Image: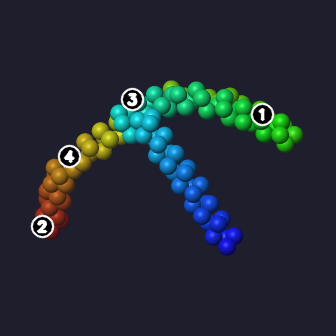
Amino acid sequence: MVSRVWSMMRFLIKGSVAGGVVYLVYDQELLGPSHKGQAALQRAEEVVPPAMYQFGQYVCEQTGLKIPQLPARPKFNFHIRESWNSGIITVMSALSVAPSKACEYTKEGWEYLKERIK
């Protein structure tokens, strides 16, 4: 009986978390245009570190533990959107020339075999 109740509670907790995540993604329009996702990421970068610090302070007060101060996070000037787009462009350009390159390499292979057979 207890295991059934515990299983049901776990299911409800996991379902609630999953539902909350789906709602958050929909509410923040993370599956929409990329500029909205980038804006949400910037908001998260501003909000999450102070919240983690406050949570750490709360845990320290409640447990009496001392958490060492972590060094500051380095700042990177790296835009994932630009690198993603350049990667997609590179792959698509390689795929677009693949048939002509395959034809070219096949002709070179036949010429090589003809020379070797003579």
Which residue in the protein does label 4 denote? 97
Q: Residues within 10 Å of mark 3 (few under 14, many from 20)?
A: few
Image-quadrant location for residue 82: top left
Q: Is residue 10 left or right of residue 94?
A: right
Front-most of residues 30 and 102: 30
Location of residue 75 in the rendering, given as x and y in whole percent from the top left corner: 58, 26
State left or right for residue 104 relative to residue 3: left
- First in sequence, mark 4 or 1: give its number: 1
- Residue located beneath label 3 in the image: 35
Q: Which tag is nearer the camera, tag 2 or tag 4?
A: 4
Amino acid identity at mark 1 = Gln
Pointer 1 residue: 57
Give above or below for 76 relative to 111: above
Identity of the residue furthest to the right in this view: 64
Q: Are marks 2 and 4 in contact (CB under 8 Å)?
A: no
User: Is residue 115 at all visible to an observer of this figure?
Assistant: no
Under circle 3, the secondary element is helix
Q: Are marks 2 and 3 in contact (CB under 8 Å)?
A: no
Q: CA distance from mark 4 to mark 3?
A: 31 Å
Residue at 25% across, 42% down: 93
Q: Secondary structure at mark 2?
A: loop
* Tag 4: amino acid: Val
Q: Residue at x 55, y 31 (%)?
A: 44
**Residue 118: image tag:** 2
In the image, 115 versus 108, the foreground residue is 108
Labels 2 and 1 touching (C-beta < 8 A): no
Q: Residues within 10 Å of mark 1 (few under 14, many from 20)?
A: some
Q: Quadrant of residue 35?
A: top left
